[in-house]
Amino acid sequence: MFRPLARMANNRGALLRTGNYYFSLAPNAGSSPDYNATGIVSAQTGKLLDGSTTTYAGWMGNGSLPGTVQVVFDLLKDYPLDRINVVMNSPNSYWGFKEMTVKYRSEANTDYYYLAGKHVRTGTALNYAVEFPLHDAVARFIVIDMKRSHAYQHIPLSEVQIYRGVGDEGTNPGPALTASELQAEMKKDGLMADRYGQWIYEDWPGKVTTDTQLQQEYATEAAALAGVELDSNVYDPYGGLKAMGQQTASGYFRLQQIDGIWWFITPDGYPFILKGVDTASIWEWGYGTPLKKTDGTPRRVFEELPDPNVYAEAYSNDANGERVSFFDGQYYEKIRQRL
Ligand SMILES: [Ca+2]
């Protein structure tokens, strides 16, 4: 029986052992040859893709070492990926990690996406592995961040199992990144916010996915509020409770004790209960998000920013730095629908 060759070649699940990787900090423990590796390590000879979960790169903790160590992989071209399994087997209880993030990007995409946000270590098992699904997303570059619980914790990294997904591999890839280019990759941000300012990596009821949905929500909200009016049989024009009886109408808001209880009194003389929500103003810059890092370079955490020509009010630049508020951006999007 004859089948087209392409159909027979289903490589889903095949382990990729290709390309190079680079450590942010040379491992000072574990199995050679990664021990003390300060340059590019080949996937063919390194210990992270050697198929053994007992060979590992390790970082001994001490008071002066960075809290986070990183490793970046260059697969040399784009691959569709099924999943990445990061194995961190500890020789004893002094080894482990606190949390881990994994992010990836394809060759053409300049921005990184995180895989499943952030993984926090649970339990105390010495043999630990974290699986990150990619669902055939295309990646050439992968960055793993591993954070210590405290300065003296040792971090092990035994094996990084990169499984191929279904799809086409990249064609005409650029040259392998140099050590300094790989260092630059490790410093890049991962995207966090979508074009509505929402967290990218989770879904929830009501999460906005289209402009049409936002417009519909405004229309629904406007319709719900259209019939709302003050019941003058129950309230005075300031919200004072008529059933409580009228006190002196002084023409201003004031306090008065009635039967031993202090009340707010409206200008018309009716008691009322003051319910306040603090700092809900859309002008409150606590809702703004910094656009730049402390070194002045852009934070690459936004999939798409509000168009500054349409939503100029979403931007501010003052003593707090340059900021964007998606709250304002959405606000003006809604207002625009009303016109
Ligand atoms: Ca290994």
Image (tube, helix red, strand yellow):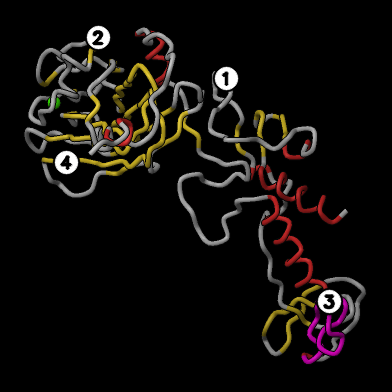
Residue type pointed to by label 4:
Tyr
CA distance for labels 4 and 1: 36 Å
Task: In the rendered structure, find residue 38 and report the number of the disc placed on it.
Answer: 2
Find residue 280 and report its horizontal and vertical position in percent.
68, 55
Find the magenta span and give its range: 227-243
Contact check, label 4 and label 1, Cβ < 8 Å: no
Sequence-wise first label, 3 or 2 = 2
Residue type pointed to by label 2:
Thr
For residue 93, above or below residue 188: below
Disc 4 under 8 Å from ligand 1? The reply is no
Q: Mark 3 or mark 2: which is in front?
A: 2
Q: Mark 3 or mark 1: which is in front?
A: 1
- Per the image, the residue denoted by label 1 is 297
Contact check, label 1 and label 2, Cβ < 8 Å: no
Residue type pointed to by label 3:
Thr
Q: Does residue 177 appear left or right of residue 240 in this picture?
A: left
Disc 3 under 8 Å from ligand 1? The reply is no
Find residue 218 and report its horizontal and vertical position in percent.
74, 60
Q: Is residue 156 visible?
A: no
- Per the image, the residue denoted by label 3 is 266
Q: Residue at the location (46% across, 29% down)? A: 112
Ligand 1 in which quarter: top left
